[in-house]
Amino acid sequence: MTTIGRREFLQQAAGASLLILAGGGRLRAANPQCKIEVLLKEPVGTISPDIYGHFAEHIGGVIYDGVWVGENSPNANYGGIRRELADRLRRLQPSVIRWPGGCFADSYNWRDGIGPRHQRPVRTNFWINTPFLQAAPDGPAKYEPNTFGTDEFIAFCRLVGAEPYLAANVRSLSARDFHEWIEYCNAPAGSTTLANRREANGSRAPHRVRFWGVGNESWGCGGDFTPQEYATEFRRFTSWVPDFGVHPAFIAAGPNGGDESWTRGFFEALIRRNRDYIRRVYGWGLHYYCGSAGRGAIDFAPADWYQLLGQAAHMEHLIQNHWSAMGELDPDHHAKLAIDEWGAWHPAGTEVHPTHLFGQTSTLRDALVAALTLDIFQRHADKVIMANVAQLINNLHSLFLAHEDRFVVTGNYHVFDMYQAHRNGRSLRTVFSAPEINEAGGPLSGLAALAGSASLHEKRLVLTVVNPSISETRETEIAIPAATVRDATVRTLSHSDIHAHNNFEHPDALVPRDSRLEVKGAELVYAFPPASIVRMILELA
Ligand code: AHR
């Protein structure tokens, strides 16, 4: 690779068809093997804002010590909700938040969480028997105080500008309990006893909850059902549900990772008597955790970096495979994918408090997992209608860590912030070509050397690109046939240390940097730094 001086470059570029840009102020010749081609005339679909959704379960430190600090807390709060969390989350336009679980949902009685807080019952939390919590001090992670219930959750959603997505208990409550929860939330003011209860609890106006999950992981903690049994439950729970003017969007408990037999079994059984039942499925709730690699969240070798990123990239195959299985029974694709749990899952050891079950410190590696995953959702905008990263705070793949008065945003937060520029855009087919990564020290389970996605917003093109190579800069031609770029801004999240992460002591160890590029011409070349996530906003003429 030749590096040339700026003056020399400008002289050469004046007569050349290729406009050269470079990160870090250096101008270089392009690697002819690296190319990104954005096909403006090949739209895939509109990117749903709900793919940037979140998930908050009553588990470990997510709700208590995370979202909820209590009204009388010395920690800054809005009616009990952690103020810094609400302020930072609101900036992300969080679209949708799923609650109260997770596995917890199928043990939860919504009635426990309404009414005067001091009168609410204390229950055993679903997760109490985990060895982690057995070793932890007693507190709300073990004994659920129900201080945070439906009305507090709705208040949290309204505070941050998100739509609530409530997951119902199918394993241990009835369809009637589910319908009464809907009635409590959505019945018009003054219309029923439950509407009056809601009013007495502070909300005269209906909550107008649209998204309803029918169980969670019903193949496991949600009831150990077979897909056929679950299809019967789903039909029963979604039959004759009062509408209250908010047509409910039901999310069915989908498969565990690649289990296509769950997908086929459910859809076959659902429509056996009547094909129209397919219309009840708004979202098919695929769950995929890409796991871990290495000794832990922070303790990993370069080969573990590549392994985990390869596992994250597997999401693409899951989407394609489940989508085609769904299409066998639902050729019009009425039902779309709602990937309502996703993220990395590292072993314990980096949680910020001993009660934070599954709490983990996210590094640059996890930020790349998030970016690769959001790019996949964006590339499949025609299939993915919603997604919820697991979980919001103090847990797996979190955007935030908090304990008492301490609070920090992780690299994952910055990725969500960078990627929100794609929301509501038209996803465009984009072809990435680059030579294989040759430093991985083993086979690279499907990890592309450059990956990303593009979306068009009238004359603004948003392009996000992940370079997973730990050491190689990718000097890449970016071709946008039939378009001229007028202006470009670039935001980059990267670090020379692949283990870089934010914590209470170093909250800005991993932060994005902005740069501006002078653009003249139709084609451009950009040097994508190693281990980076780059977002370009290109204004087209
Ligand atoms: O996110 C943690 C747990 O992972 C959820 O409760 C469950 O749905 C999944 O297995």
Image: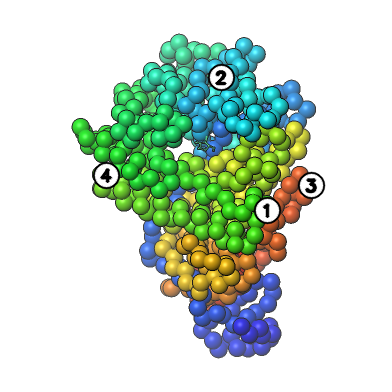
Query: Which numbered dot is residue 241?
Result: none
On the image, the x and y values in percent for residue 96 come to 51, 38
Badge 3 or badge 4: first in the primary sequence: 4
10 Å crowding of disc 3: few (<14), some (14-19), many (20+): few
Residues at badges 1 and 2 in contact (C-beta under 8 Å)? no
Check disc 2 and report its element: helix, strand or loop. helix
List the residue tagged with mark 1. Answer: 299
Amino acid type, residue under disc 2 in the picture: Gly
- Cα separation, mark 1 vs mark 3, equals 18 Å
At x 43%, y 42%, the residue is 256
Task: State which quarter of the image contains the N terminus.
Answer: bottom right
Q: Is mark 4 within 8 Å of ligand 1?
A: no
Badge 1 or badge 2: first in the primary sequence: 2
Front-most of residues 516 and 474: 474
List the residue tagged with mark 3. Answer: 505
List the residue tagged with mark 2. Answer: 113
Check disc 3 and report its element: helix, strand or loop. loop
10 Å crowding of disc 1: few (<14), some (14-19), many (20+): few
On the image, the x and y values in percent for residue 119 come to 62, 11
Query: Which numbered dot is residue 330?
Result: 4
Amino acid type, residue under disc 3 in the picture: Glu
On the image, the x and y values in percent for residue 82 come to 68, 32
